Image (spheres, rainbow, N blue to C red):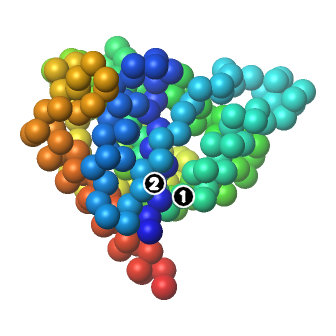
Amino acid sequence: MITIVGIGGSLRKASWNRALVRAFAALAPENVTVEEATIEGIPLYDGDLEAASGIPPAVTALQDRIAAADGLLLASPEYNAGMPGVFENALDWLTRPPGAAGRVFSGKPTALTGATPGTAGTISAQAEWLPVLRAMGVNLWMGPRLYVSGVNKLFDDEGQLIDEVMRKRASDFIAGFAGYIRLLKSAQH
């Protein structure tokens, strides 16, 4: 069994990226589970807050989930041709305190995707994530990229992925990522 933690990088309840994570969960191959996680409850990073109160419980809970998972799936919105500040902030917290990034992210198989109503997908945001993910030490899956554009036409009002072409692309993406994780796990044994 492969467990993947999927995080949609938005706080919006009706987030397209959170819906995309749920679509991956529904389309995952047999023996693969995609568990949706959230960045809700993670405050703005403040070194004074960390010094006074330690790591917030929402952060430690998400760190533990990621560390225990076989893989990490990040579904990033694109805001003004860049990565969302709220998502970057959450990942900044997840690397705290010093040394936590190694426990949580070092070598973690990670896939990056994203959805936007715009026409260019999330290509700019995904490009901005590359140096951040490299610094965190993840093992980034460089399989076929998935830039989801026109997302507002692909999901119904309940957040279900209804576009058959995108369902196939999403299914292929999650199957490819799961295959990558299996390959890495077999190489470790």
Relative to the observer, which residue lies in front, 125 or 178? 178
Q: In the figure, residue 162 lies in which quadrant? A: top left
Residue 128 visible here = no
Q: Position of residue 33 (x, y in %)?
A: 42, 56
Residue located beneath label 2 in the image: 4
**Furthest residue in direction top, as rendered:** 80
Left or right of 162 on screen, residue 135:
right
Relative to the observer, which residue lies in front, 64 or 158? 158
Residue 53 visible here = yes
N-term-proximal mark, 2 vs 1 = 2
Q: CA distance from mark 2 to mark 1?
A: 6 Å
Relative to the observer, which residue lies in front, 186 or 131? 186
Q: Position of residue 112 (x, y in %)?
A: 36, 43
Q: Residue at x 22, y 50 (%)?
A: 171
Q: Amino acid at mark 2?
A: Ile
**Furthest residue in direction left, as rendered:** 165
Q: Position of residue 133 (x, y in %)?
A: 47, 45
Residue located beneath label 1 in the image: 69
Height in image: 125 above or below 113? above
User: Do the CB atoms of the residues marked 2 and 1 lie less than 8 Å apart?
Assistant: yes
Q: Residue at x 22, y 45 (%)?
A: 170
